[in-house]
Image (cartoon, rainbow, N blue to C red):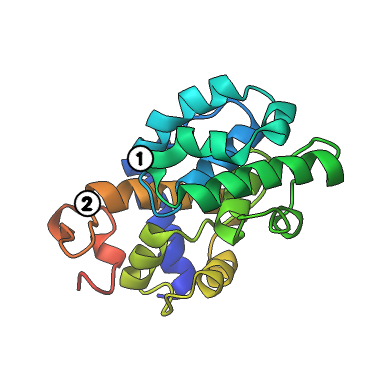
Amino acid sequence: MTKKQRAALCVAALKEEYPDALCSLKYTDPLQLLIATRLSAQCTDARVNQVTPALFTAYPTLDAFCEAKVEDVEEYIHSCGFFRAKARDIVGMAQKVRDEFGGVVPDTVEALTTLPGVGRKTANLIVGDIYHKPAVVADTHLIRITNLLGLVDTKDPKKVEFRLRDLLDPAESNDFCHRCVLHGRAVCVARRPQCDSCCMKPYCKSAK
């Protein structure tokens, strides 16, 4: 079996197990998802979802974030960790979206990664979830699970992203990433994977 064939089988198995492949961050527009994703770095999505309602109420528009004082934003996001850097990036990314992108969150990885605090993982999430383009969000769950499956053999996020782009059906890649997150939380848990309950067990090199 080739890696591409194994990848297709894993995509199908996860699609059946998790038919609703949804991002767990809560948002109503592209800027909110961009900000929530920045907040999620080294923080749980659950914590971010507790913090963002008050943040987005206080700053309901792009202009509001552009005019915000960094120290005021810090107060809202304090519990997310690394709050000073995140607050600085949030205000900075809003200002750059306004000043250099006409107030519209960009739709390419290349443009998004010019924004303060935005790496390829965040950029791919925006490209996939907002603009519905093929994307590979190489978060810790995806990296761990695809290594266990034998689809990749590297922990480098960028290398994982590009190798999976070659293996996955572009129309399925974004949802596959979301499903790997769900699977990584529920079944293929770090340090205690429940292989006997895994829908991808027949195709997983580590399970064998």
Alpha carbon separation for disc pair 1 and 2: 12 Å
- Provide the residue designation for mark 1: 18
**Screen quadrant of the C terminus:** bottom left
For residue 130, which quarter of the picture? top right
Task: Specify the label residue 187 is tagged with.
Answer: 2
Residue appearing at x 36%, y 72% in the figure: 147
40 displayed left or right of 103 = left
Q: Is residue 35 above or below residue 194?
A: above
61 displayed left or right of 47 = right
**Dot 2: within a 10 Å radius of its alpha carbon, few (fewer than 14), some, or many (20 or more) residues?**
some
Q: Is residue 108 visible?
A: yes
Residue appearing at x 55%, y 57% in the figure: 121
Residue appearing at x 74%, y 52% in the figure: 108
166 displayed left or right of 191 = right
Residue 42 screen position, x and y as percent: 40, 54
Please tell me whether mark 1 sits on a helix, a strand or a loop.
loop
Amino acid type, callout 1: Tyr
Amino acid type, callout 2: Val
Residue 144 screen position, x and y as percent: 34, 66
**Screen quadrant of the N terminus:** bottom left
Q: Is residue 128 visible?
A: no
**Dot 1: within a 10 Å radius of its alpha carbon, few (fewer than 14), some, or many (20 or more) residues?**
some
